[in-house]
Amino acid sequence: MLQTAEYAFERGEHPGLETNFTILELPDPAHDVVYAEGLMGPVYLKDPNDLRRSHEVFKRLQSIALSPEETADWISRRQLKI
C-alpha cells in the first residue's frame, strides 16, 4: 500500500526533514528494512533499533500530516494558483 499526505509548511518543522526514508515491510522469511537517502547516498538499515525509530518517526509524521480530505483540498487550492 502506498499512501501520500501533504504537510503544510505553516505547521513548522517536522521529524522527516532529516532524511527521506521508506520502510519496506517484507514477507517472512525476509526481514523488514528501512531505505534511507542522504548526503552520502542510499543506506539500508536492518537493525531493530533503526526500524523502531523509523516507525516512530513515521507515526509522528502521520499524526501531523494533513488528512486525506485536507490534502485533496490543499492540492485543489494549489492548482487554482497555477
Image (cartoon, helix red, strand yellow):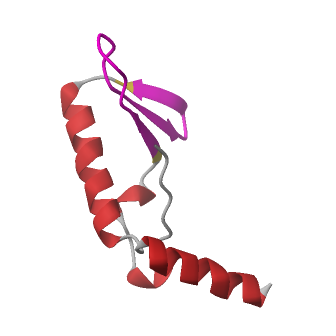
Q: Magenta residues?
A: 21-44
Taking 76 as reference, is 56 above or below it? above
**Do we see residue 32 in this rendering?**
yes
**Do we see residue 8 in this rendering?**
no
Q: Is residue 51 magenta?
A: no
Left or right, 24 with reference to 39: left
Residue at 52% x, 38% y is 37
Q: In the rendered image, which quarter is residue 64 located in? A: bottom left
Residue at 46% x, 37% y is 36
Image quarter (top left, top right, bottom left or bottom right) of the C terminus: bottom right
At which x and y percent is residue 54? 29, 43
At which x and y percent is residue 22? 44, 40
Left or right, 74 with reference to 36: right
Taking 31 as reference, is 63 above or below it? below
- 39 and 19: which is toward the camera: 19
Taking 74 as reference, is 27 above or below it? above
Left or right, 53 with reference to 80: left
Q: Residue furthest right?
A: 82
Q: In the rendered image, which quarter is residue 17 located in? A: bottom left
At which x and y percent is residue 2? 49, 47
